[in-house]
Amino acid sequence: MNVIKNRKIFYGISLAIIIVGLIMIATKGLNYGIDFTGGTSIQIKIGKMITVDEAREIMNEYDKEASIVHVGKSKDEIIIKSSKNFNNNEVNDIIDKFVAKFDIKDRQFQSEKFESTMGNEIKQRALLSIAIASIAMLAYITWRFEFKFAVAAIIALIHDVLVTLSVYAIFRIPANSAFIAAILTILGYSINDTIVIFDRIREETKLNPRQTVEDTINGSIKKSLTRTINTSLTTLISVVILYIVGVEDVKVLALPLIFGIITGTYSSLFIASPIWYGLKNRGKLNTKKA
């Protein structure tokens, strides 16, 4: 497998996804959840456990994208979160339909309206966290390896974030505060894989100093491939199982992690190293010109 020779193909795949995603974000925006947009939260005590699909049959009339999760020890209560600002009559209509459909004897519910100020604060803190993490990783990788390795790693991380955002924009998946937590987790997971491959490249460079940079990178990726895929696949299987059997709150966190693990593994193997190769060659060309 010649990663360097085929790097333009890998770049093209990523750019295609990112460009389509950015166009969707520019034209339609991200599908922000209640944490960002504000909206209405309704908690209803059903008295027995019902499925999310049963609750959604009622909510589809009001908001098809509403989030529905179970709460309580017996999972006999549900919380409905909608980005729509329901008035009192609409809230009462929703409650009445749940009471009638599930024969609720003790009518217990509470509703609350949210403003988008909390969402703005979450976004600002998330961007600040990503910036601080990127600077810290840039400094660490520069100290541990070299500056060009650090730049390549940070570009690969930006790639992971943009691809994950693009997937959310293209498929109109609701983004909420759990999505932010997942993005930060993805950054840590992806940089770990990238550092492993960079460490292998550094070792191969010392062991085979006469080998071309292209052969060193391809050989390092080949030797790291089994370890990287096995690690990612093991994690991916666990997260997919959580998404399948987990409650709604777990699914909200697991979904971006699934995309992130795939994207992070892809970027570690096919994006980060080719970018370092380009930076390395560019430095050599500049030296020759001088």
Image: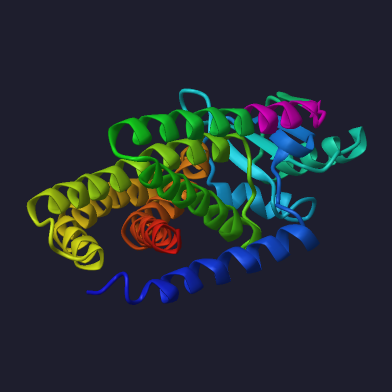
Where residue 85 appears, as percent x and y from the top left, is 86, 38
Q: Which segment is the magenta one?
A: 112-125
Query: What residue do we see at 56% from left, 41% from top?
Result: 179
Q: Nearer the viewer, residue 41 or 183?
A: 183
Where residue 221 appears, as percent x and y from the top left, is 22, 60
Query: What residue do we see at 79% from left, 39% from top?
Result: 96
Q: Quadrant of the N terminus?
A: bottom left
Q: Nearer the viewer, residue 226 or 75?
A: 226
Horizontal side, residue 237 vs residue 208: left or right: right
Query: What residue do we see at 78% from left, 39% from top?
Result: 37
Q: Nearer the viewer, residue 196 or 40?
A: 196
Horizontal side, residue 149 vs residue 48: left or right: left
Quick check: is 255 in the magenta stretch? no
Asked whether residue 50 is in view, the answer is: yes
Asked whether residue 46 is in view, the answer is: no
Magenta region's main secondary structure? helix
Query: What residue do we see at 59% from left, 53% from top?
Result: 165
